[in-house]
Image: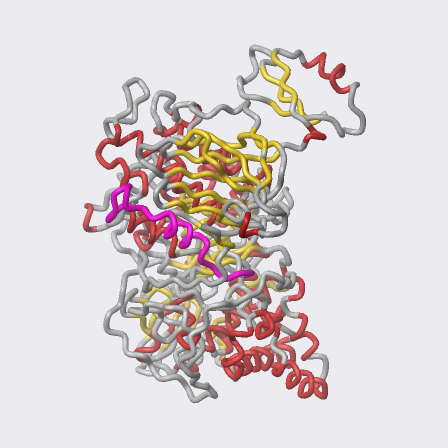
Amino acid sequence: MFSLVRVLSFSTSSLSSHKGVRNDLQIAKQQPRVVVRFGSRHRHFLYSSTTSICGKEESCSYMSAVLTDDNLIVTTADEEMEHIGILSVDPGLEPHKDHFKYRVRRYADQLKLFEEHEGGLEEFAKGYLKFGFNRVEGGIVYREWAPAAQEAQLIGDFNEWDGSNHKMEKNQFGVWSIKIPDSGGNPGIPHNSRVKFRFKHGDGVWVDRVPAWIRYATVDPTSFAAPYDGVYWDPPSSERYHFKHPRPPNPVAPRIYEAHVGMSSSEPSVSSYREFADNVLPRIRANNYNTVQLMAVMEHSYYASFGYHVTNFFAVSSRSGTPEDLKYLIDKAHSLGLRVLMDVVHSHASNNFTDGLNGFDVGQSSHDSYFHTGERGYHKLWDSRLFNYANWEVLRFLLSNLRWWIEEFKFDGFRFDGVTSMLYHHHGINMAFTGDYNEYFCEVTDVDAVVYLMLANCLIHNILPDATVIAEDVSGMPVLGRPVSEGAVGFDYRLAMAIPDKWIDYLKNKNDQEWSMNEISGTLTNRRYSEKCISYAESHDQAIVGDKTIAFFLMDKEMYSGMSCLTEASPTIERGIALHKMIHFITMALGGEGYLNFMGNEFGHPEWVDFPREGNGWSYEKCRRQWDLVDTEHLRYKFMNAFDRAMNLLDEKYHFLSSTKQIVSSANEEDKVIVFERGDLVFVFNFHPENAYDGYKVGCDLPGKYRVALDSDAREFGGHGRVGHNIDHFTSPEGIPGVPETNFNNRPNSFKVLSPSRTCVVYYRVDESKETLVAEDVDEDNLEELASAEKDNAGPTVIVSGLKEEEEAEETTRQI
């Protein structure tokens, strides 16, 4: 079977994650708006392979032109409405042109309003310089948006919680403000002291709330279920962390290590930012990841929510340390060449009254609140509040929040959580998306949210052009991952969420003989051409209590008794380790343009993640990572970790993830073998539980000599060492040149390999002009003699081993 990378991608699974599934949502009516209902035309083919992709720097070029002057706006905007770029990229969207015209017009109008009233989008997103607490000449100014409040005061340690002398004033936009003058040369509010916003609502009742823009919030650890307090955070320069290292350059393909700082310790306790920086970041770098994605950074009062019920959007989670500690972590990551992404939650907010934004909702209209009123403003499934993305101050709050994390903490991008819930009024609940375009572009689309995401992506890429922004979307909405300049939403990547679902289905419901090579390769390649994906076999979703990791699915209870190298591996352990390597690697190699792994899964961490909660007696026993398992030399966990390191290194060397050349030349159901090319590498995956194939013929594009680049059966990865690594595989031409149907599996060349059962082997084409020489026991002093024969670094690569006894036994590659 021959298959170019498929050009359509739709997840057919309904919205299902750690947040659960809602069964009884009634679609709330939208505010009056222009929306066009389209017909039932079902589109299959999307983009041609010749489509060019606009760079990020172009993301807002059209809109900046639209905003040149009032006279130009009408004509230019009207012309652009007729020539929306995404319609040229995907002609199948043409029937939905009116929908795109409407949302692009909404976006352009919003940018124009920002320009007229706030100095533009980027200035508008500096709200944290106006709202919350800010130093000014001679004092501290505090501002809070609370239009429904009747009176307001600032209270805290600084005035012994008596606000009678610190009453706030309200302007015409519902913003309350007060200036606290310095006293005796010292700030009127001491650094690291507690503060709250006290206001009286329409019923005449006074309530105390944590300030919405607070930059740090803490809770009394000795008091059960104690409410959070806002903390005024403004350390003196001597205590403030100052960044020392520049941001690493944007990698051509992200290899992402998803991590939760709090549960990253081996001890059953909450780990700190500094402990993570010093103990875990070096592990991530050693395994050749180039990006860290941090979960649960924004303050959340309920630890077991995994960070997804945010209470304080501008505050670092205090469980793991202070804002300065988080800055230390990010700077340490940058020093190691690791970029840092933040798992940002703008899809909903915690329902907590005393701790979070919900506390500002005292029955007022949507216009006066952060959230929609009634059913539209409440997510029954998640027990959380839903933002009103059409509200001016909500846009200021959320867009400024993104800029805050980039500017203040030097994050390099974001993974947006719950995007499906944002995109549709039904939130994706009980929806089996089939790929029919009418499911995406109709009255169920929340255009307010779409416009917000367009603004967010434009802002992020304007202030940080090489930012990485990822969407967690299960619906497969077309054009989510195309530039805003084309009228699309503007994400750089989307998560390939259907892939882990497929692996779970296979591991739960199919024996090895029932695994379909066509279905596996089809699932992995089923994505929209030119919209990049981050593939993953398992993330935190698959690791939490109630589910199982892939390793636990494969080996279960034998992981407690059969992982010692001092005893012979059982068939279950042999199968488990072999398939664990294969599943993760084929997902990486074939599933997207980037790759993600959740902390610990790289070495097959046993068991699940279970946060302390009432149901487990508030235990931290399974809310940690057992690093000692992979560090113990005689345990087999080290083999899976070593393979994870090697497959990341393979991409670092050959850049196959970023290659647009992806061809599945064979998915043989009888042999249980998948052969494909990614870049100029040839991948051979043999999923057969028993059969090994000697002289197995595989197709390739380029003629020449091929050698092993990576072999899961190597002994260093817990394999049996059956594949020779020093063997040259020479190609033979196939069929008539230029006539694919006469070729072998539609490939113009082929070579033969040994393919043992349950193994994956990658082959690279040898560049004859840079042949590899192996020099055993060469002293460093003799390297000059080897180098003298070559000029201008154009010679061969010399793999030198055994330089000195005290050095590590691993090979050191030197280019001479």
Q: Main secondary structure of the magenta part?
A: helix
Whether residue 198 is visible to the viewer of this picture, yes or no, is yes
Above or below — where is 614 with respect to 556? below
- Residue 539 on the magenta span: no
* 16 relative position to 396: left or right: left
**Coordinates of residue 547 in the picture (x, y in percent):** 26, 48
The residue segment tinted magenta is 507-530
Above or below — where is 647 with respect to 232? above
Q: Quadrant of residue 14?
A: bottom left
Above or below — where is 786 with respect to 121? above
**Coordinates of residue 490 in the picture (x, y in percent):** 55, 66
Nearest the camera: 451 or 645? Answer: 645
Q: Residue at x 36, y 29 (%)?
A: 637
Q: Residue at x 57, y 38 (%)?
A: 336
- Quarter of the image containing the C terminus? top right
Q: Quadrant of residue 18?
A: bottom left
The count of marks equals 0
* 228 relative position to 101: left or right: left
**Coordinates of residue 165 in the picture (x, y in percent):** 45, 71
Q: Residue at x 72, y 85 (%)?
A: 72
Q: Residue at x 64, y 86 (%)?
A: 78
* 319 relative position to 83: left or right: left
**Coordinates of residue 120 in the picture (x, y in percent):** 64, 74
Q: Quadrant of residue 730?
A: top right
Nearest the camera: 66 or 262? Answer: 66
Above or below — where is 216 with respect to 333? below
Nearest the camera: 630 or 378? Answer: 630
The way the protein has been coloured in the rendering is: secondary structure
Whether residue 292 is visible to the viewer of this picture, yes or no, is no
- Residue 527 on the magenta span: yes
